[in-house]
Image (cartoon, grey):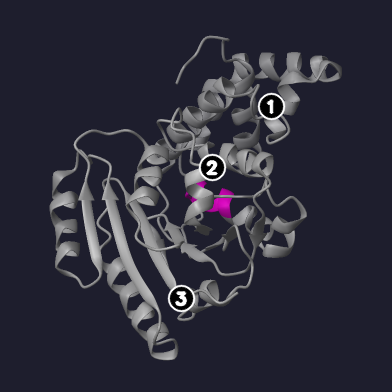
Amino acid sequence: MSKNEISILIPVYNTVCVDVVQRLLVMCEEAQERRPDLRYEVVVADDASPDRNSAMQNREIRRLPNCRYIEKESNSGSAATRNLLAREARYRWLLFMDCDLRIENPDFIVNYLSFPGEGIINGGIAIGAGDCRNLRFLYEKSCEQRHTAAMRSQRPYQAFRSANFMADRAAMLRCPFDERFKKSGYEDVMLGKQLASFGIPVHHIDNPTVMVDFEDNAAYVAKIERSMRTLHDFRQELQGYSRIITLGSQPWLAPVRCVLRLWHLLLGSAERRNLCGDHPNLTIFKLYKIGYYLTLKNQSVK
């Protein structure tokens, strides 16, 4: 079924996204030339960014046609911000995008509007150019082959990610993001599981946005540590949706866990220094993530 209305929804935090919004408006106008009945809007919600300069620059969005800019008074996390955007949207089809991704395909909007499937349509991401000394770039580039629609479609719910997807508004209101996730990390994995339980179909297509913003190594390691704590908190609910949880829970893997815990206790600090330095190693990165998770205590750390 062809789609003739779309709300493009962008949660933002400490990032200026005026250029992204302007690019999207151009693509919507071009799509409207082909489809005169198309209705569209762009809604941006700032999650109480402490960087007030970026928030002030984003106020320019209010001057743009078919755009709204919402400034939240308090920070509630990316899950709650996406749910707010879904409620605020005027149109049936919701296109959620992360604010720090680039759009290179001029048919990006048309590809979503012309896809016949219902429910959730996940466009995926591609990896742009980066520095080989940057851990985030190295990791994302090593995983790029898993981002194709063919690969994601093999496990459609487990492969769902929230950086770039379209959803029927009714489906998102019925099955919203879990607002217990206050920081970014695994809230999209939880949503994938919930979509499966509600029987809402997830389709994967090759319509990527491009990752071009790679935080420095120390910031990325801290982000991964935070995400591992989140994963540990929700390990019971996310069973079957993370290999790290499987490693941490299966009785027959107990000897492996003992070795990995000991390794992390002895060498975790040295591993972290490598990852935060100029020559990060991806094998060390994998060991550090697993070791960090396995040495977490059982208290809540949300």
Disc 2/disc 1 C-alpha distance (Å):
24 Å
Q: Are marks 2 and 3 in contact (CB under 8 Å)?
A: no
Amino acid carrying label 3: it is: Asn
- Residue 121 coordinates in the image, percent (x, y): 59, 61
Image quadrant in which the C terminus is located: top left
Disc on res. 4: 3
Is any atom of residue 263 visible in this view?
Answer: yes
Report crowding for label 1: few under 14, some 14 to 19, many 20 or more residues within 10 A (C-alpha): many
Q: Which residue is mark 2?
A: 175
Quarter residue 292 falls in: top right
N-terminal of the pair, mark 2 or mark 1, is 2
| Main SS class of the magenta portion in the image | helix
Magenta-drawn segment: 133-140
Disc 2/disc 3 C-alpha distance (Å):
23 Å
Counting every numbered tag in the picture gives 3
Q: Which residue is mark 1?
A: 245
Q: Residue at x 68, y 34 (%)?
A: 242
- Residue 289 coordinates in the image, percent (x, y): 60, 30
Q: Is 16 in the magenta?
A: no
